[in-house]
């Protein structure tokens, strides 16, 4: 057995504690060397490695106790080995571990060939190595580029390289143990990059291509062929960076290929581009008018080129700024108006650009509808319809339509038509213009009504003093009636749509000429109708004057300003009415009542009607005297005078007059109190009744006599036998007197004859207070009620009257 040289690697660190398991692993492997690593085993004084292949001993190595990694060298390449490591103490094997590993392949032969597939890719051929799982190709250049590319077989491609660059290439074989040493390098160089170029089609028969210069290129080669054709249309060599291909087919797609040549004469990487030529100019352009509902358009059509490549879009343009686009053979320009002159061109476009425009096609649209329609009526019942001519019109047709009848037409090349038109007839009139493109749209429709017919059965009647009512039968064609009432320079108008009109604010007592004029909005008013004459009612009397003749009669006068009229005067009072009639300017009203207010007015009448009443004048007659008046005496010096209602009286002055003086009162009431009355006196009674306006009536009534005078100086004395005597001062009248003594328990009285001034009360009860009254008796025998009383206390002296004490005066209750 041949022993191999052994190299020992010494460990740098020691293990503090013993391990329970002993393990070994391959640290690295080359084509001739394998390095192992194991764990430290406690108690081991050395480690021994035994290498076998196919049960044959190949190598042996031993290491000290502090070594945990060791290499076995000089092994044959690409061979599978079994490595067994023993932990030994003296002659005793403490533990054993093993691992299998092969050596890496041996260095490969140099790469056979290197070729440039394109400007960024090299292709390499090499011999395969038995036992290699794959290969690594190392690529380098002088600029510091370095890359390793994995390959599984030959040939292999190396991509993403720089164009026109020289590289150094070597190859290594790889198995499970590792890689071999690199082979001897060979060189390879990439070709020129492809030209980066662009293209365009300036016309429908040429294509222009241009490109950026390629570094290190000395010449360029270009070829062109039609798509789907294997035949080249030419190969062109140039040192420039642009080239024009001419004589090509319109609307066709071409494929253009270009590559560059380097100084070594190598063909560079190629590129190609597809470019279409512009389409052919559209031909046989035709224009016509089409309608879409109420919108007019121009339908433009042309011939299609069936042998063109790809989609073609056609652009139709009018010089009046109308545009439409399509991919078919026709397109509609909308909306167009009447009387327009269009110059139309069609352009075809594809991805290369637009073609040349087609030859201009000039088209005139249908004419505009005539305007300014007007109708003129003549006296013969004929009408002439006129209108303004319009540009581009060859002829005109007037349409004349009446309610309930068919449409009448009138064709002409001029601007007017004449037709028969009776009064009050409504027409719908329109005119159409024509040319080669068709008729104009519906234009102005003239709604015209001829002069209305004159009304029939006109009736004029007076409804008030200044108002006339006019009625008539409706007339054909009239929408408004103008009623006129004329007199001299005065004209009163009434406009209404009804066949009835009331004219007011007319002048009184005047003959008016009344005419009803029918009108409509179209033709105006028919002023040839017959007039009617009608008188208005008399004028109202004015300047009314009242002249009283006496308390019950007045004369009424006024200003009469009518041609012929009768007058009626009315005096309306509170309870009665008086009238008088005349054809003059005054009359008398009699038998007026006292205390009344009369409203006096005058009315005039004639065959035309009755005037308004004149402005009223008011007459107030003297107030009535009260029918009944009564005088009642309240006290010796005061009376109450009362009286019944007096019509028309507002204020009363009552007076009592005598030779001894008089009393008077002013009041609005029906009674009053009068003082300063003298007793036993005869009075004359008079009254003055006064109205609202101050008119007065003097009233006289039956006289009044005041009551007899009450005695004075009344005194009470005691006499004998329980009697009392009352004494007073005599008034000198011829009236009897009565004395009354009233106590709380008993009453006494006595009577004195005329001229006497005392009387006695017998058997008077003492110990009481007595009220003493002495009053005269009237002629009728009644006692005067308003004489004063005196109080006396009558004391007792034993069973008899004692002292009589005066207690004072007391008025009558």
Image (cartoon, grey):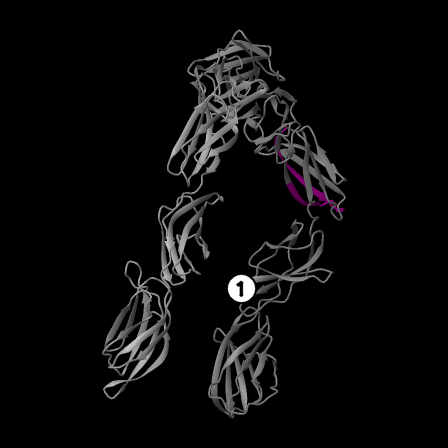
Question: How far from the left and from the top, in percent, is residue 6?
Answer: 60, 81
Residue 255 on the magenta span: yes
Looking at the image, which is closer to me, 255 or 262? 255
Q: Residue at x 48, y 79 (%)?
A: 98
Question: How far from the left and from the top, in percent, is residue 118?
Answer: 65, 49
Image quadrant containing the C terminus: bottom left
Looking at the image, which is closer to me, 381 or 123? 381
- Residue 805, relative to residue 233: is it above or below? below
Residue 719 on the magenta span: no
Looking at the image, which is closer to me, 715 or 403? 715
Question: How far from the left and from the top, in percent, is residue 59?
Answer: 55, 79
Looking at the image, which is closer to me, 192 or 716? 716
| Magenta stretch secondary structure, dominant | strand
Residue assigned mark 1? 131
Can residue 314 be seen here? The reply is no
Q: Which residues are magenta?
A: 250-272
The residue most toward the top is 380
- Residue 305, relative to residue 720: is it above or below? above
- Residue 654, relative to residue 595: is it above or below? below
Secondary structure of residue under mark 1: loop
Quarter of the view holding residue 804: bottom left
Can residue 339 be seen here? The reply is yes
The residue most toward the front is 755
Question: How far from the left and from the top, in percent, is residue 763?
Answer: 22, 79
Quarter of the view holding residue 167: bottom right
Image quadrant containing the N terminus: bottom right
Q: Is residue 439 left or right of residue 646?
A: right
Q: Is residue 637 left or right of residue 508?
A: left
Q: Residue at x 24, y 88 (%)?
A: 798
Neighbour tally class for label 1: few under 14, some 14-19, many 20 plus, Cα within 10 Å: some
């Amino acid at each position: 057995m041949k022993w191999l040289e052994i190299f020992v690697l010494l460990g740098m660190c020691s293990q503090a504690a013993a391990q329970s398991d002993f393990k070994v692993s391959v640290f690295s492997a080359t084509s001739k060397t394998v390095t192992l690593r194991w764990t430290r085993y406690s108690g081991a004084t050395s480690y021994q490695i035994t290498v076998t292949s196919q049960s044959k001993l190949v190598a042996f190595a031993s290491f000290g106790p502090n070594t945990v990694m060791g290499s076995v060298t000089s092994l044959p390449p690409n061979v599978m080995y079994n490595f067994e490591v023993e932990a030994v103490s003296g002659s005793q094997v403490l533990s054993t571990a093993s691992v299998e590993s092969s050596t890496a392949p041996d260095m490969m032969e140099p790469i056979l060939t290197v070729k440039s597939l394109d400007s960024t890719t090299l292709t390499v051929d090499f011999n395969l190595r038995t036992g290699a799982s794959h290969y690594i190709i190392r690529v380098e250049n002088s600029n510091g580029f370095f890359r390793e590319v994995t390959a599984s077989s030959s040939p292999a491609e190396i991509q993403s390289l720089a164009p026109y660059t020289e590289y150094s290439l070597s190859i290594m074989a790889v198995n499970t143990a590792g890689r071999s040493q690199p082979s001897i390098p060979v060189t390879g160089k990439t070709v020129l990059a492809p030209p980066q170029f662009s293209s365009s089609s300036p016309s429908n028969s040429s294509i222009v291509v241009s490109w950026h210069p390629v570094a290190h290129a000395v010449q360029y080669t270009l070829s062109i062929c039609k798509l789907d054709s294997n035949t080249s249309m030419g190969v062109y060599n140039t040192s420039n960076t642009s080239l024009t291909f001419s004589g090509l087919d319109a609307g066709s797609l071409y494929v253009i290929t270009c590559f560059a040549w380097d100084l070594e004469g190598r063909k560079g990487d190629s590129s190609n581009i597809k470019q279409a030529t512009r389409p052919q100019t559209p031909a046989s352009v035709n224009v016509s008018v089409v309608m879409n509902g109420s919108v007019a358009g121009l339908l433009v059509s042309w011939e299609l080129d069936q042998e063109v490549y790809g989609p073609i879009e056609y652009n139709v343009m009018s010089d009046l700024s109308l545009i439409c686009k399509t991919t078919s053979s026709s397109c509609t320009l909308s909306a167009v108006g009447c009387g327009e002159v269009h110059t139309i061109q069609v352009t075809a476009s594809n991805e290369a650009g637009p073609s040349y425009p087609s030859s201009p096609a000039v088209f005139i649209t249908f004419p505009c509808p005539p305007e300014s329609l007007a109708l003129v009526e003549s006296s013969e019942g004929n009408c002439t319809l006129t209108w303004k001519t319009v540009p581009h019109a060859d002829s005109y047709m007037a349409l004349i339509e009446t309610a309930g009848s068919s449409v009448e037409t009138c064709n002409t090349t001029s601007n007017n038509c004449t037709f028969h038109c009776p009064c009050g007839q409504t027409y719908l009139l329109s005119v159409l213009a024509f040319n080669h493109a068709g008729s104009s749209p519906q234009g102005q429709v003239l709604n015209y009504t001829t002069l209305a017919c004159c009304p029939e059965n006109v009736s004029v009647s007076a409804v008030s003093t200044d108002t006339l009512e006019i009625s008539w039968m409706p007339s054909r064609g009239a929408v408004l009636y103008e009623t006129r009432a004329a007199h001299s320079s005065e004209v009163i108008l009434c406009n209404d749509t009804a066949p009835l009109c009331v004219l007011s604010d007319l002048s009184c007592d005047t003959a008016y000429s009344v005419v009803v004029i029918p009108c409509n909005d179209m033709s105006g008013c028919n002023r040839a109708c017959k007039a009617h004459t009608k008188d208005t009612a008399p004028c109202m009397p004015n300047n009314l004057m009242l002249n009283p003749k006496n308390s019950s009669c007045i004369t009424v006068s006024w200003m009469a300003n009518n041609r012929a009229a009768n007058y009626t005067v009315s005096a309306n009072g509170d309870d009665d009415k008086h009238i008088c009639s005349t054809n003059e300017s005054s009359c008398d009203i009699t038998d007026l009542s006292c205390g009344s207010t009369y409203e006096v007015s005058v009315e005039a009448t004639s065959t035309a009607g009755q005037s308004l009443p004149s402005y009223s004048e008011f007459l107030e007659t003297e107030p009535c005297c009260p029918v009944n008046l009564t005088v009642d005496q309240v006290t010796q010096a005061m009376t109450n005078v009362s009286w019944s209602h007096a019509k028309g009286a507002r204020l009363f002055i009552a007076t009592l007059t005598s030779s001894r003086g008089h009393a008077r009162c002013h009041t609005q009431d029906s009674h009053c109190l009068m003082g300063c009355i003298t007793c036993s006196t005869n009075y004359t009674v008079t009254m003055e009744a006064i109205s609202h306006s101050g008119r007065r009536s003097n009233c006289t009534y039956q006289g009044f006599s005041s009551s007899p005078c009450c005695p004075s100086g009344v005194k009470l004395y005691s006499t004998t036998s329980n009697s009392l005597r009352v004494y007073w001062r005599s008034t000198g009248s011829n009236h009897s007197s009565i004395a009354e003594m009233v106590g709380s328990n008993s009453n006494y009285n006595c009577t004195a004859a005329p001229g006497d001034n005392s009387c006695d009360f017998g058997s008077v009860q003492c110990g009481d207070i007595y009220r003493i009254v002495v009053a005269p008796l009237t002629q009728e025998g009644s006692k005067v009620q308003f004489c004063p009383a005196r109080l006396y206390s009558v004391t007792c002296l034993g069973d008899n009257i004692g002292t009589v004490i005066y207690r004072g005066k007391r008025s009558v209750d």
